Structures are given as C-alpha cells and as structure tokens.
Image (cartoon, rainbow, N blue to C red):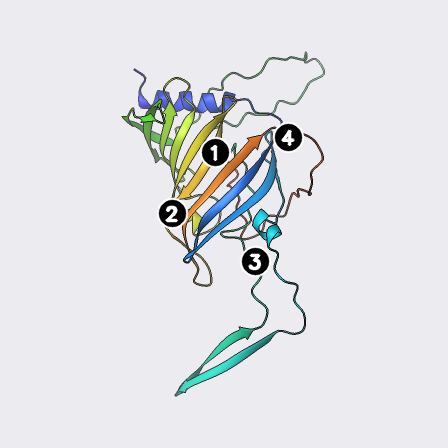
C-alpha cells in the first residue's frame, strides 16, 4: 500500500496530467441567506483553460429578470437628532430603493482551479533546431521541498467511489497553502473532495473553512461546489449564511456568438477571485 506522501504526489501528477478543452463555458450559481432572505444569483461565464483567464457577464440572470427601477427626481432623506448631553443623528433615506447588490461579490471564477494541486509547468521557449512534436505531458515530477506534512486518515467511499482521505498540514505559508483535507480516488488519484482554510482573496471569505466538491468532466477534475463552513460577516452589518458557489452546465462552447457579451472585467476590491496559484 502507498504511503500518504506518495498518494499526495500521485494526486498532483494526476491533476497536472488532466486534459481540458481550450475553453469552457459554464454558469456560476451563488446561493445563500442574506440575513433571513434566500438569495440566488446565476452568472454566465467562460474560461480559457490554458491560462485561467475568465470572462463573465456581470449582471446575474436574476438582475436581468427584475432590473431595479430607473431613478427620477432627487434623493431625499430624513434626519432625526437624539440628544442627551451630546447628539446622535439618524438618517433614513426616503424614495429610491438601494441598487441590487451581489450576495458576496462579482464572481471571476473558473471551475478548473485546483488549489495548488497542479504543478507549474515551465514554458519552454522554442528553438530553431527544435523538432515539432505531438507528444503531451503525462506526468510531472517535482523536486522542490515538501509544502505539506501528509497523513492518511482512512479510505472511505464517496458517492460510490473508493478514496484516500488525507490530512494536510502546511509546513510553510499557511495562508497560501490552504488545503487541510483531501479525498482522492484510489484508482485515478483525482480529487473528489477537499477542505480548505479560507478561500478567494477577500475577507471574511479568507478567514473561514470551505468544503469543496469535485466532479469529473470527460475524465478531468473540475470544481462542482464550494460551501462556506460558517457564517460570513460582511460590511454594513450584513450577515450571509449557508453560502454555496456551484459551477453548473460546464461544457465546451457550442459557437462563437453569444446572445449577450461576456467581458474580462477589472478585478475590484469585492470581486471573487482565486489567488494566483493553480
């Protein structure tokens, strides 16, 4: 039987060797409770799998179905002062409702992100003497220092698939090396589930555990669902609960013409993006 670290190395090689189409189209579904209100937002997106660049339609299907009213006139608010030695001023807007807001940010995400499992393959510059080749990379062997201490916990079945369940303890840079548990298939070493210490690049999403489920699309691993392990306390006293980000309808593009344009937007402070590690 393989030891735990050998299983980890096999998993990294299997992920690195996975082959994807040049581009994937998909829908990003973000659901949760905004306070006590169930909320769901669906965004159309497309990713270049060679470099992870993402294009997304920045308005969700729900926003398109029910756009906010066009404001007219002027904004009005009522101020009330309460004084006991010193005063508090309470301001209550009157009139136009607040604009539609994303549940936890605009998602600039792609389903082939692998949380550091994939080896970085150096790009070889072509030389004049090089012969063209059609051979593809089958596996990559890393000689770098270990990033995690790896332990084998057990071998459970997940949805009928026999897996190795690994515990991962970062040996350095714990904020970057976020994997804490990993389940990989015993036959193919591809990931089926993971637990991470934080996710994305903005707080509080970086400060809570996340449960990640994977699926296989034509034999290659993709993220199917990411679920926050605790409540998210956002700005303006917002509490968002039971947050799940799902990648749906993952497919090769059926054509080059979209019924609405996809953009490669600028990354803002509240955008959902992954760290620059695959």
Direction from residue 37 to residue 46 in the image, left or right: right
Question: Which of label 3 and label 1 is nearer to you?
Answer: 3
**Could you give the CA–CA distance between mark 4 and mark 2, rounded to whole angstroms?**
34 Å
Q: Residue 28 in the image: state x and y as whole percent.
A: 53, 41
In the image, is residue 128 above or below residue 36? above
**Could you give the CA–CA distance between mark 3 and mark 1, rounded to whole angstroms?**
27 Å
**Label 4: how many Cα within 10 Å (few below 14, some 14–19, many 20+):** some
Q: Residue 96 in the image: state x and y as whole percent.
A: 59, 69
Direction from residue 48 to residue 184 in the image, left or right: left
Callout 3–callout 1 Cβ contact below 8 Å: no
User: Which comes sooner in the sequence, label 4 or label 3?
Assistant: 3
**Could you give the CA–CA distance between mark 4 and mark 3, rounded to whole angstroms?**
30 Å
User: Which comes sooner in the sequence, label 2 or label 3?
Assistant: 3
Residue receiving disc 2: 208
User: Which comes sooner in the sequence, label 4 or label 2?
Assistant: 2
Q: Residue 225 in the image: state x and y as whole percent.
A: 45, 37
- Residue furthest bottom as drawn: 85
Label drawn at residue 100: 3
Question: Which of label 2 and label 3 is nearer to you?
Answer: 3
Residue receiving disc 4: 253
Callout 2–callout 3 Cβ contact below 8 Å: no
User: Which comes sooner in the sequence, label 2 or label 1?
Assistant: 2
Q: Nearer the viewer, residue 67 or 120?
A: 67
Question: Which quadrant of the structure image shows residue 213?
Answer: top left
| Label 1 residue SS | strand
Label drawn at residue 223: 1
């Amino acid at each position: 039987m393989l030891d735990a670290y050998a299983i980890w190395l096999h998993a990294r090689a299997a992920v690195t060797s996975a082959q994807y189409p040049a581009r994937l189209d998909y829908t990003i579904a973000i659901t949760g409770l905004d306070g006590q209100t169930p909320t769901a937002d669906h965004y159309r997106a497309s990713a270049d799998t060679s470099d992870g660049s993402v294009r997304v339609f920045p308005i969700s299907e729900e926003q398109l179905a029910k756009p906010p009213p066009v404001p007219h006139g002027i904004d009005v608010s009522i101020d009330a002062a309460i004084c006991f030695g010193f005063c508090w001023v309470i301001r209550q807007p009157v009139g136009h409702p607040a604009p539609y807001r994303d549940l936890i940010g605009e998602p600039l995400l792609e389903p082939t992100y692998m949380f550091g499992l994939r080896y970085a393959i150096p790009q070889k510059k072509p030389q004049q003497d090089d012969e063209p080749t059609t051979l593809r990379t089958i596996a990559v062997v890393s000689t770098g220092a270990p990033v995690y201490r790896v332990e084998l916990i057990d071998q459970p079945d997940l949805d009928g698939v026999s897996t190795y369940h690994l515990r991962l303890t970062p040996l350095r840079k714990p904020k970057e090396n976020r994997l804490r548990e990993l389940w990989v298939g015993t036959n193919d070493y591809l990931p089926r589930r993971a637990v991470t210490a934080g996710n994305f690049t903005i707080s509080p999403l970086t400060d809570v555990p996340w449960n990640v489920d994977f699926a296989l699309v034509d034999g290659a691993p993709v993220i199917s669902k990411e679920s926050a392990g605790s409540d998210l306390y956002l700005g303006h006293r917002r509490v968002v609960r039971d947050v799940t980000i799902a990648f749906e309808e993952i497919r090769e593009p059926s054509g080059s013409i979209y019924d609405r344009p996809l953009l490669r937007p600028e990354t803002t402070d509240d955008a959902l993006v992954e760290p620059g590690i695959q």
